[in-house]
Amino acid sequence: MSRPVAIVTGGAAGIGKAIVEALIEDGYLVVACDLAEERGKALENQHAGSVIFRRCDVSSESDVEAVVDGVLREFGRIDALVNNAGIIRRRTSEAMNTEDWDAVFAVNARGAFLMCKHVANIMKRQRSGRIVNVSSVAGKLGDITSAPGYGPSKAAMDALTKTFAREMAPYGVTVNGVAPHAIETDMSAQWSEERRKAIIAAIPLGRLGKPSEVAAAVRFLLSEGAGFITGEIIDVNGGFVMD
Ligand SMILES: NC(=O)c1ccc[n+]([C@@H]2O[C@H](COP(=O)([O-])OP(=O)(O)OC[C@H]3O[C@@H](n4cnc5c(N)ncnc54)[C@H](O)[C@@H]3O)[C@@H](O)[C@H]2O)c1
């Protein structure tokens, strides 16, 4: 078989970048989609021949269509999709306005939906493919870090994972998620020192997670060995939630 092709959203930084690098090790040609052009192009240059950067706002259907159509035209297949792009807006619920709410849902929930929607037909035709959605512990627990739109948007993503898992199962396509907590990236760099200490104190393993540790779970869900797992959301949280 020719080289497998993966799309990773939010692939220019943090967890997304670690996922891109893990998939390169697994032999994928990776299309990294992101808004961050400078970082995306730097990643493309760093891994020339294995990573292609595409600027894409996942909340925009025309951007998503352009990327998916382009990948299909150029490479003829899509073997893996990782919906990792996500944003958080930290506000009290009183301060949070409808623009904040809509912006968070537009990226975290609508973005994952649009990517799944446009990739699903291709994977159905191929009768193969893997999708992994990068959710959050907040999808299960609700907000824990003063961001009242974030947990609900990730809960929507978790329901989307199960919805597409059912729809895609007859075609041999699996759809799963990972639910990280407290991973060391730009997103967690927004915490105050006090919050950081409190978050670490509540984690049984007593430390923050690494982006590569989330990537390892994604890599497993994309692997051949995970072929009988679908509709599952794997915790990557240092034991913070055990369910
Ligand atoms: N860091 C954590 O502790 C943590 C915990 C739980 C879940 N997560 C989830 O993991 C994922 C990655 O988080 P991270 O910590 O690496 O964040 P990050 O902010 O470091 O990186 C996110 C990337 O997504 C990109 N992005 C944002 N909006 C986009 C859009 N509309 N279209 C395309 N790309 C867009 C950003 O440019 C950035 O490169 C997110 O979905 C986040 O919700 C992170």
Image: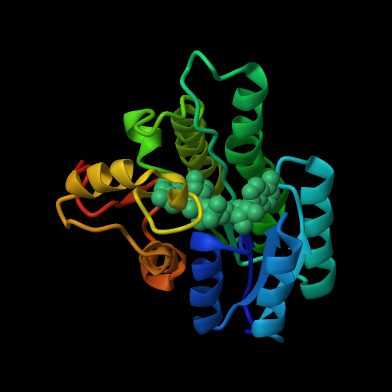
Q: Quadrant of residue 226?
A: bottom left
Q: Is residue 205 above or below residue 30?
A: above
Work out which residue is located at the far left of the displayed protein and give it.
204
Relative side of 83 to 243, left or right: right
Quick check: 231 left or right of 12?
left
169 vs 223, nearest the viewer: 223
Residue visible at 27% across and 44% down in the picture: 199
The x, y position of residue 89, in whole percent, is: 55, 34
Q: Position of residue 164 (x, y in %)?
A: 54, 42
Most distant residue in the top direction: 94
Q: Residue at x 46, y 24 (%)?
A: 148
- Looking at the rendered image, the quarter that the N terminus falls into is bottom right
Residue 8 appears in the rendering: yes
Q: Residue at x 66, y 34 (%)?
A: 106
In the picture shown, does residue 194 fall above or below 217?
Answer: above
| Residue 2 shows up from this direction | no
In this orientation, which residue lies closer to the viewer: 189 or 84? 189
Q: Quadrant where the C terminus lies?
A: top left
* x and y percentages locating residue 173 in the rendered image: 53, 56
Q: Is residue 40 left or right of residue 242?
A: right
